[in-house]
Image: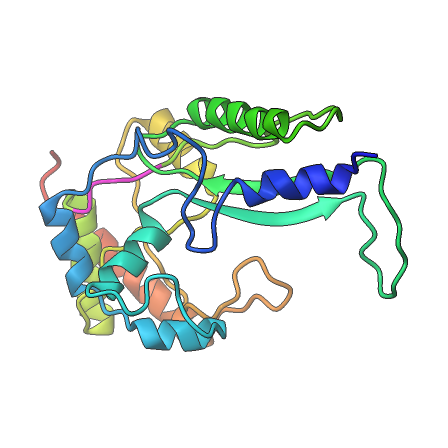
Amino acid sequence: MHEAMTDLVNIFANLVDCHGNIKIPGIMDSVKAVTEEERKMYQTIDFDVEESRTDVGAKKLIHEGNEDAKVKTLMHRWRFPSLSLHGIEGAFDAPGAKTVIPMQVIGKFSIRIVPDQTPAEIEKLVVAHCKEVHRTSGSPNDIKISMELGCQPWMSDPNHPHFVAGRNATKLVHNVEPDMIREGGSSPVILSFQEAIGENVMLLPMGCVDDGAHSQNEKMNRSDFLNGIKLFAAYLEEVAKVKKR
């Protein structure tokens, strides 16, 4: 018979390849084009590809070895959409060699979207692609695709006076020139704040990369907490110096 797990694995295999390329037709059509100014910003960011590879425990990164490995790695980490497979519900996953054949399985995956993509647009493309992959497989099994959560992408202007104030405050407290980065994540409240108040929103980091945000052992160093107080005070002082656009 046509097994549900086989159908699901076939769909999974047609979502993304081993090089990180999303195989869903049309998914890159609405991605905002990279500008030369933006590309230059990536070139100056303090980032080491080899150190990053070591930190995550990987044998090789996807874009490692390319002529512009740092820029390509950062762009695919931050500014291009990415697709990750997360799990299969209903399948046997306990220790042992039981040969359970599930009658029904649920596959879970996510897509990090970027400007100017929309959840509705991506959902439509994903549903159409999954149904087409399943149709061409010849399996008579039923398939259902649904989006559990969809959030609009958010990005602000790094040259806005608030960001200038943030950079100045960071240099004052930490004595370093901060990098302007884009970080993939799920913080829909940011866009809600911006739309509600009609003003620019800025994320001013105060922690470390090893804080383990949202994990069981999430922490914040005491020094970062104290410097965070100084940073926020310095930021308010810098904001008072700039003129509103």
Which of the two residues, 230 or 127, is positioned nearer the viewer here? Answer: 127
The stretch of residues the image draws in magenta is 154-158
Q: Is 155 in the magenta?
A: yes
Q: Is residue 203 visible?
A: no
Q: State the image coordinates of residue 156 (x, y, percent, origin top left).
A: 26, 40
Quadrant placement of the C terminus:
top left
Which of the two residues, 83 or 244, is positioned nearer the viewer here? Answer: 83
Occupied quadrant, residue 11: top right
Q: State the image coordinates of residue 33 (x, y, percent, origin top left).
A: 20, 37
The secondary structure making up most of the magenta span is: loop
Q: State the image coordinates of residue 64 (x, y, percent, origin top left).
A: 32, 68
Q: State the image coordinates of residue 87 (x, y, percent, origin top left).
A: 67, 49
Q: Is 82 in the magenta?
A: no
Residue at position x 38%, y 35% in the image: 153
How is the model colour-coded? rainbow
Quadrant placement of the N terminus:
top right
Which of the two residues, 142 or 160, is positioned nearer the viewer here? Answer: 142
Query: On screen, 127 above or below 53?
Result: above
Q: How many marks?
A: 0
Position of 94 compared to 5: left or right? right
Residue at position x 74%, y 24% in the image: 142
Q: Is residue 149 visible?
A: yes
Residue at position x 87%, y 63% in the image: 97
Residue at position x 58%, y 48% in the image: 85
Query: On screen, 98 above or below 144?
Result: below
